[in-house]
Amino acid sequence: QKEVEQNSGPLSVPEGAIASLNCTYSDRVSQSFFWYRQYSGKSPELIMSIYSNGDKEDGRFTAQLNKASQYVSLLIRDSQPSDSATYLCAVTDNTDKLIFGTGTRLQVFP
Amino acid sequence: GAGVSQTPSNKVTEKGKYVELRCDPISGHTALYWYRQSLGQGPEFLIYFQGTGAADDSGLPNDRFFAVRPEGSVSTLKIQRTERGDSAVYLCASSLTGINSPLHFGNGTRLTVT
């Protein structure tokens, strides 16, 4: 079983819609959770971090964490074509290294 | 300020050859990570340095892979007897203190083994 699971997509949403990206993880002791955005041919860049249960909002982005269900999600409101990218979920394991999922490709069409 | 710098950006080598990939982290960052990313996959952890020492090298696939960070700044990933399966983008990231401070990635080195 993979440690961090994401649907590879593509997830296609129209411009202005809410994009919902989901991630599950297997290690119950994970403490820190991150969302990275990766444009094609570029390196990952951090967009959100979340450490406690609940929601964390930053501009158009909201991260949601449910440790009981081992589930973390990212909502992107008012999606723009420039949001089209691969979104990587990353989770710390019990040795404090960051484990990435395979990423979900998001396509926002005008 | 300068970000994480990786050189070369591209490396083509023949099967069986030795390669070195260099990473120059952000000044003052004590933690340095190497990841490998294949097409359509997420970054795969290789090794993590805290200062000069390898805090976790559990991701290195076999003994052909080795990494050093002798002065706690620049790191070199060394691959001996390269194989075609080693072809990937090798990403380096640094962070100020460790896993709970943001990781800043370099642009990666695309390694192609022919």
Image (cartoon, coloured by chain):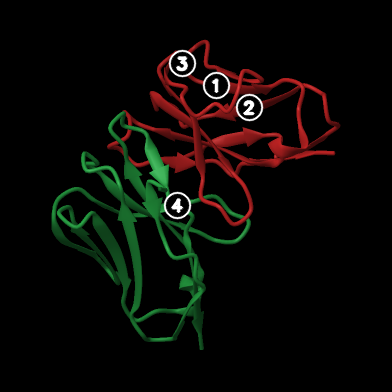
Report if residue B80 is visible in the image: yes
Mark 3 is on which residue type?
Gly
Q: Which mark is residue A45?
A: 4
Chain B rendered in what hue?
red
Q: At 39% from the left edge and 79% from the top edge, which residue is drawn?
A: A79
Question: Is B59 or A81 nearer to us in this picture?
Answer: B59
Q: Give the CA distance from mark 2 to mark 4.
A: 20 Å
Q: Which secondary structure, mark 4?
A: strand
The mark nearer the N terminus, 2 or 1, is 2
Q: Which of the image's four quarters has the C terminus of chain B?
A: top right
- Residue at the spot of label 3: B72
- Residue at the spot of label 1: B74
Looking at the image, residue A72 lies above or below residue B91 = below
Q: Which mark is residue B22?
A: 2
Check if mark 3's residue and mark 2's residue have beta carbons within 8 Å: no
Label total for image? 4
Q: Are marks 2 and 1 on the same chain?
A: yes
